[in-house]
C-alpha cells in the first residue's frame, strides 16, 4: 500500500510537478476468528467468521483454510460452518497466508449442559506478591447463565502463578502463566497473565584482563526464553569461546560444571540463543549471570549481571 503525495516546486517562472510515494508502515498480517469460544448442539451448526488484516493493517476479505483438530467432535466446511457431531471439545483453525488463529469449540447434547466457561480478564499483568481474584462465567449453548456449578482452576505454572480453588491467583516469580477454569469437564480459553517483568538486561564487564563489553537481554518471547546480544557486544576470542548462564561470575570451573551452556561464538556483535530449546525448564529468574567462558582453558573472559 502506498500513499501518493503531490509535490510542487517553483523556480523563476517555471514549475515542476512530481509524485512522491510513501510506503505505509509494515505491521504484519493478522487473523482472528469470531466468535470464540463457539458452542454448538450435536447435529446443529454455527457459523465462524474471520477478520484478516494484511501487512499494512488493512482489513481484507479472505477465504481461509478451515480445519478442526478433532473432526469426530466437530467438522467445518470451506465457508466456516461448524457442525457438532458428538459431545466434547476441540479447536477450530483458520489459516490464510502466513497467519492462523484458533477458536475453542464445545459440542453438547442438550441445552441443559455446560457449553461455555469464560474467565474474566480483569487483569493481564500483576506484580510479584500481588493477588487477584478471577471470576468464571458458566453458560449453556444459548448463552444463558448456569449457577451452582463447581469451578476447578488450573495454572500452567504454579511456580510463577499459583491459584486457589476460589480463583485467587498469586504472583510468585517473573514470567508468563496461563489460567483456565473447568466446569463439568468443559474448559475455558486460557487467559495469559504476565507476572512481574518478562525481560532482564545486563552489561558485560571484562574479567582477568580480557575484553568484554556491550549489552544483552534475556526475555520471554512467545513462551520461549531468548538471550540476545546487542550490536555493541565485543569480547576476546581464544581456543573456544562459549556462552553460559550461571549463578556465579567468579569460579570458571563452577560455571563449566553447573551452568547452562548455550553455545560457542566466533564473532562480535548480535547473537541470539534459544534457552528454552536447550532446556525447557529454565525460567527467567533461574540464573543471575551471562558468562563468556574460554571453555578449553576454563577461563572467564567477562560476564553480565542480569537485572
Image (tube, rainbow, N blue to C red):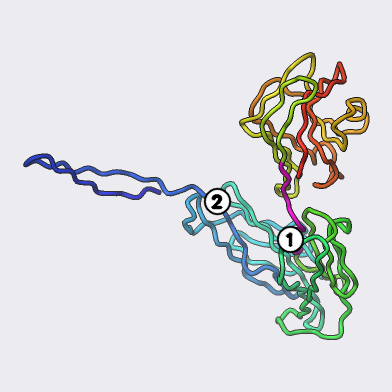
First of labels 1, 2 by sequence position = 2
Q: Nearer the viewer, residue 69 or 252?
A: 252
Q: Is residue 241 magenta?
A: no
- Residue lying farthest to the front in this orientation: 209
Is 242 left or right of 259, judged from the image as shown? left
Task: Kindly report the secondary structure that dominates the magenta region of the rendered protein.
Answer: strand
The alpha-carbon separation of the residues under discs 1 and 2 comes to: 21 Å
- Residue lying farthest to the top in this orientation: 239
Work out whether 198 lies above or below 290: below
Work out whether 21 lies above or below 271: below
Q: Give SS at disc 1.
A: strand
Q: Nearer the viewer, residue 154 or 47?
A: 154
Which residue was labeled with disc 1?
91
**Residue occupying image coordinates x 80% and y 60%:** 128
Which residue was labeled with disc 2?
29
Q: Give SS at disc 2.
A: loop
Residue 121, image x and y in percent? 71, 70
Q: Nearer the viewer, residue 24 or 67?
A: 24
Residue 129, image x and y in percent? 83, 63
Q: Which residues are magenta?
A: 190-201
**Residue occupying image coordinates x 69% and y 37%:** 216
Amino acid at each position: 500500500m502506498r500513499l501518493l503525495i503531490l509535490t510542487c516546486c517553483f523556480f523563476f517562472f517555471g514549475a515542476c510537478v512530481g509524485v512522491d510515494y510513501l510506503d505505509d508502515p509494515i505491521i504484519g498480517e493478522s487473523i482472528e476468528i469470531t466468535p470464540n469460544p463457539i458452542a454448538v448442539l450435536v447435529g446443529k451448526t454455527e457459523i465462524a467468521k474471520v477478520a484478516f488484516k494484511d501487512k499494512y493493517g488493512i482489513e481484507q476479505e479472505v477465504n481461509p483454510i478451515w480445519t478442526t483438530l478433532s473432526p469426530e467432535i466437530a467438522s467445518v466446511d470451506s465457508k466456516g460452518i461448524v457442525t457438532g457431531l458428538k459431545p466434547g471439545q476441540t479447536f477450530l483453525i483458520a489459516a490464510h497466508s502466513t497467519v492462523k488463529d484458533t477458536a475453542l469449540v464445545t459440542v453438547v447434547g442438550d441445552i441443559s449442559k455446560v457449553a461455555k466457561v469464560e474467565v474474566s480478564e480483569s487483569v493481564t499483568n500483576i506484580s510479584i506478591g500481588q493477588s487477584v481474584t478471577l471470576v468464571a462465567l458458566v453458560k449453556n449453548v444459548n448463552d444463558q447463565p448456569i449457577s451452582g456449578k463447581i469451578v476447578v482452576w488450573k495454572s500452567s505454572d504454579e511456580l510463577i502463578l499459583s491459584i486457589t480453588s476460589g480463583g485467587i491467583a498469586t504472583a510468585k516469580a517473573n514470567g508468563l502463566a496461563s489460567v483456565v477454569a473447568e466446569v463439568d469437564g468443559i474448559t475455558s480459553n486460557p487467559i495469559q497473565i504476565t507476572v512481574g517483568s518478562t525481560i532482564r538486561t545486563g552489561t558485560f564487564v571484562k574479567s582477568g584482563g580480557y575484553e568484554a563489553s556491550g549489552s544483552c537481554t534475556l526475555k520471554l518471547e512467545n513462551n520461549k526464553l531468548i538471550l540476545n546480544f546487542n550490536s555493541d557486544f565485543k569480547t576476546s576470542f581464544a581456543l573456544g569461546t562459549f556462552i553460559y548462564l550461571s549463578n556465579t561470575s567468579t569460579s570458571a570451573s563452577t560455571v563449566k560444571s553447573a551452568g547452562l551452556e548455550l553455545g560457542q561464538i566466533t564473532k562480535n556483535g548480535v547473537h541470539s540463543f534459544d534457552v528454552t530449546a536447550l532446556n525447557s525448564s529454565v525460567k527467567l529468574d533461574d540464573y543471575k549471570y551471562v558468562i563468556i567462558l574460554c571453555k578449553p582453558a576454563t577461563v572467564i573472559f567477562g560476564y553480565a549481571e542480569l537485572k
